[in-house]
Image (cartoon, rainbow, N blue to C red):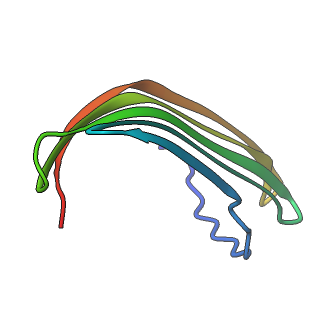
Amino acid sequence: AGRRELSVPLAGVPLPLVDGELRSGIASVGATFAGMYADVGDATGRFLDGELYARWLLSSEFQIFGGYRYILLDAAGKASDRKFDADVAIDGLFFGCGICF
């Protein structure tokens, strides 16, 4: 069977975030972007998360929304003399509904 190792490095890493929304009547469009980078000795990594969306208020309590989201996780390093590399990108359309209160 394959060998497995669990490594749990802890590091306080800030996550800067930019968020903007333009509202007009019952509709709004917006964008959000966040990203972070960490170097914890034997490993480095970055995380990026971006989103574009539109939102429509159906009433004062209900809304529907949809958009596009992109998430990137890129990490590489060395643990117990073994190199690792993880590159994950997830993107796609999303939609949903919400309750406002």
Q: Residue furthest top?
A: 92
Which residue is rendered at x = 11% and y = 56% of the image?
Answer: 61
Which residue is rendered at x = 31% and y = 30% of the image?
Answer: 66
> Left or right: 13 with respect to 24?
right
Q: Identify the image quadrant of residue 67.
A: top left
Query: 93 or 18, which is in the foreground?
Result: 18
Q: Residue furthest right?
A: 41
Q: Identify the image quadrant of residue 83.
A: top right
Which residue is rendered at x = 18% and y = 60% of the image?
Answer: 100
Q: Is residue 13 above or below residue 94?
A: below
Q: Is residue 67 above or below residue 35?
A: above
Q: Is residue 20 above or below residue 70?
A: below
User: x, y percentage for residue 54?
Assistant: 36, 32
Q: Identify the image quadrant of residue 27.
A: top left
Query: 32 or 22, which is in the foreground?
Result: 22
User: x, y percentage for residue 3?
Assistant: 57, 50
User: x, y percentage for residue 82?
Assistant: 78, 49
Q: Quadrant of the C terminus?
A: bottom left
> Left or right: 96 with respect to 37?
left
Q: How many marks?
A: 0
Q: Is residue 36 above or below residue 54?
A: below
> Left or right: 46 with respect to 65?
right
User: x, y percentage for residue 11?
Assistant: 74, 74
Which residue is rendered at x = 13% and y = 54% of the image?
Answer: 60
